[in-house]
Image: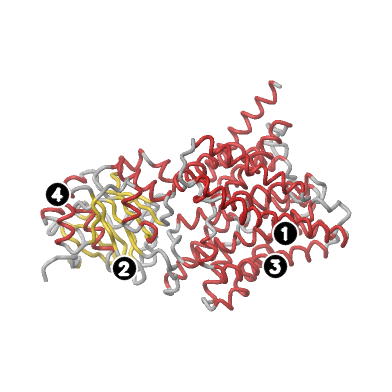
Amino acid sequence: MHHEILYVALVLAAALAGGRIAIRLGYPSILGEIAIGIVLGPPLLGLLESNEAISILGEFGILLMMLYIGLHLDLHDLKRASIPGLLAAIGGFVVPAGLGAALMLAVGRSPLESLFVGLAMGVTSLATKSRILVDLKILNTRIAHVLVAGALLSDLAVLVVFAAVLGQGTADGISLATGAMAGLRALGFGLGAVLMAALVLPRLKRFTRDREFDRNATLLGVIVFGLLGAYAAELAGIHAILGAFVAGLLLDGETIGTKVDRDVQSKLSTISVGVLAPFFFVSAGFHVSLDVFRTDLGLLIGVIALATVGKIVGTALFYLPSRNGWREGVVIGTGMNGRGAVEIIVAEIALAQGLIGQNVFSILVFMALFTTATVPVLLTMGVRWLRSSGELVKAGGRNEAIVVGANAIARRIGSTLLPAMPVTLIDTNRENQARCVLEGLTVQLGSGLDEAVLEESGVKRASKLIAATPNAEVNVLAAQLAVDLGVPEVTVLLRNSDARTFQGFLSASGISVVRAPDDLGAWEHAAASGDATLVSIQIPDDLTVSSNGTGPPWPSDPALFPLVLASAYERLPFTSDLDLSSGGEVIGLGIPGQLAFPDPDPVKEVGAPM
């Protein structure tokens, strides 16, 4: 017993270390968790190993993780891009799955083993997509909605097919009769879920509509509901992970309350993704065999190559009927190439059931690691490609910006963004409100920390929110509330010292930072008095570094405070993680006569005299 407790602690510590390293390198934490299991576990160093407690915690964590993913998904994303997303999902699933199954059959593997390899190759990791879409600031674009819809649909297909045959298959294969019975059971489970959504949940919504419930009790109720869904799936002869996932999809903010829903999601994410699921992914690394590089290297390379080519080419080809352009199809294919959590879950369960061998499991794990590692690189290149060709299309529904704060600097940010989209500023100060009116800016009197004020300001239509008050804590809190309310691109204005203080929190929430000079108060005074004016500086054609300090910082001038990056296609807050290589101009506050840049162009401000 004592040794089991010690191993639980060591595995959790290893998962934390591996996940942190992966995130620092720009990859999902599960890649680090699997990798640390390979390095510290039996495949390499043999310092850690699994036991019954770790297995139970991991299995429970996966059920809660699938419940969280279902709860977290907004089905409205499917409606925004249903047809293009369906096309991308079909191509991104059928082509790599077919190629994978054909490859395995060609090398003499059993039909059932070939089927599971194909399923694993057809998976698309939704969690990987979500993070990189935040980092690239493209959550409000069409490709983001198509990626989310395509990933959800392809994963649903994988889970249904996998769960339908899992209980009926054996290592020798699956008969037509048992396959048909499995399909009928899966259909029965689906009909049960539809009846639950149509008959039971509306009554639950009416019961909870005007009542206040303890949030911890609500969290427990959601977990119980998810576990009952998992149990129902098991009774239907399909795997529990699908039941937990569907249970999460059925619940929404209307059922348990929007504010409570966000709180439940946050806590459930911490419990599942942060604490319990890592046991599963670290122990998955324990089961990997490095012998595959000696015995099946050719097959490993073939699986990785076909998984990558099949996903990109299949998605692009099937996406052509959407008439959104072949370039967009290729970029969506690169974004869908990552596997991740669902693929590892499918492979791990298939291994435990004896449906695939350890070498095939190892091939699938290394395929997941490699393909997921390509997504940040390939998708970043693809987004640059679309931007440079003017084909990065904004999605409908969210086309406005909100600036929290209406002080002088916030007004300059608002007026600079205004040519690209409608902007609303929020401030409690009536003098600042009056200044906005004089300058022709739309302003809402109230606090950016008040959800009702944000909703009145159009937060559900906002693709961007910039918190730019002089108070760092207010900015961070307003930004977090905006993230909770679903604003795709959230930015805070912070001094360097404040940015360091909140770095971990901001990074975890996907919030970007406009770096303000340490003498922010002096810049505020200069902007208010007219001593600092808006100027525009063209980005040099040969500039290839980013503004995050990975190369020589640009622009670097103590008399210039960059606020916005303007290109031919969009205007973005000048954050510390922008890529400047696509060109454009930097608009910011400059002090005339002190600028190092020769003759910067003045910028006409909203409300300024002609």
| First reached walking from the N terminus: tag 3 or tag 1 | 3
Dot 2 or dot 3: first in sequence order is 3
Measure the C-alpha gap from mark 4 to mark 3.
Answer: 60 Å
Residue at the image point whose x is 36% and y is 63% from the top: 543
Query: Looking at the rendered structure, which numbered label has been put on residue 420?
Result: 2
In the image, what residue occupies the spot 59% across and 53% down? 249
| Residue 347 placement, left or right of 591 | right
Nearer to us of marks 4 and 3 is: 3
Please, what is the three-letter code of the amino acid marked with disc 3? Val
- Contact between marks 4 and 3 (CB within 8 A): the answer is no
Corner quadrant of residue 565: bottom left
Q: Position of residue 575 (x, y in %)?
A: 34, 54
Earlier along the polypeptide chain: callout 4 or callout 2?
Answer: 2
Query: Which residue is denoted by mark 3 in the rendering?
Result: 94
- Pointer 2 local density, CA inside 10 Å: few below 14, some 14–19, many at least 20: some
- Amino acid under label 1? Leu
344 displayed left or right of 438: right
Q: Which residue is mark 1?
A: 119
